[in-house]
Amino acid sequence: MSQIKHVAIIMDGNGRWAQLRGRPRTFGHVKGVRVAKKIITHAANLGLQNLTLYAFSTENWFRPQEEVSVLMKLMERYLVRETENLIKNNIQFHTIGDLSKVPTNVRRLINEAKVRTAHCSGLKLTFAISYGSRQEMIGAVQSIATDLKDGVISLNEINEDMINKRLMTSHCPDPDLIIRTSGEYRLSNFLMWQASYSELYFTNILWPDFKEDDLNKALTDFKNRSRRFGRIEGVLKTLFNKKEKNHAELNF
Ligand code: IPE
Ligand code: IPE
Ligand code: MG
């Protein structure tokens, strides 16, 4: 696990999983939480440093009220039941997203979990709740614009580092790997700035069917990726230099 520091997962497909079984969508969400718990424990056992789980997007607020309220209840139940386990497993709890929209009791439990796990030094677990990448970027722009207007910073001080620090993810590095389940091939407003050089992994498995071994598979796949960050790899570089020489000979 040396080079992979941060895995982020778009846990998608709960509704379809339930519908395939002739059950209400919320049944899929209940199973989805169980799977999330298992994957969190597995990630902690693997020694992963950062795991971010997309649990609820800004746009998910537009789902039917009953579904939204079940999702909030599940979050509440998760926190009530799991905060103690997070501490036991040395997991530090974080969130990204606009919590002002989240019911007060859920917000209180979230803050409590953050305080109670603050000393934990193992896995950093981040739940994206009421999260949207565009909204996050607006927040960063507003904060920079305010400081600029107040003369706290100057225009030429604005750089990537400053933006990184004003995003909600300032506590963790960019994700190395983003996994999306359920056969959808999009980011759906998730970590769009931070995903600039993330490796993307898509699987048709619906989130409630996702197993520890599926995470292992994604991690193995990641290991075989060649991350170039716009540069040229050692081997390719040698080949390219040879070609360049040929090109020079050909007067290219
Ligand atoms: C992901 O599953 C969970 C949330 C978005 C909260 P979905 O609820 O999106 O399930 P599908 O995509 O409709 O099957
Ligand atoms: C993305 O899934 C959000 C979460 C997994 C929490 P959605 O199901 O909301 O995304 P779309 O609507 O298919 O893009
Ligand atoms: Mg979905």
Image: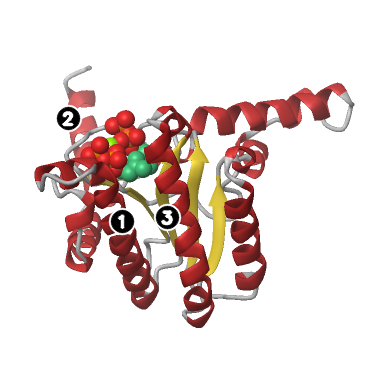
| In-image side of 204 versus 110 (left or right) | left
Q: Earlier in the sequence, mark 1 or mark 2?
A: 1
| In-image side of 158 versus 96 (left or right) | right
Q: Is the N terminus in the top left, top right, bottom left or bottom right quadrant?
A: bottom left
Query: x, y percentage for residue 249?
Result: 19, 25
Circle 3 Cα neighbour tier, 10 Å, few/some/many (<14 / 14–19 / ≥20): some
What residue is at 67 percent from the left and 26 percent from the top?
Answer: 141
| In-image side of 225 versus 123 (left or right) | left
Mark 3 residue type: Leu
| In-image side of 117 versus 124 (left or right) | right
Closer to the camera, 5 or 213? 213
Q: Residue furthest right?
A: 151
Mark 2 residue type: Asn
Residue of label 1: 30
Query: x, y percentage for residue 165?
Result: 65, 44
Residue of label 3: 74
Circle 1 Cα neighbour tier, 10 Å, few/some/many (<14 / 14–19 / ≥20): some
| Residue 187 visible | no
Dot 1 and dot 2 residues touching (CB under 8 Å): no
Q: Is the C terminus in the top left, top right, bottom left or bottom right quadrant?
A: top left
How far apart, in angstroms, are the residues tagged by discs 1 and 3? 7 Å
Query: x, y percentage for residue 216?
Result: 21, 65
How far apart, in angstroms, are the residues tagged by discs 3 and 2? 63 Å
Q: How is the image coloured?
A: secondary structure
Query: In what element is the residue under mark 3?
Result: helix
Mark 1 residue type: Val
| Residue 94 visible | yes
Residue of label 2: 246
Query: In what element is the residue under mark 1?
Result: helix
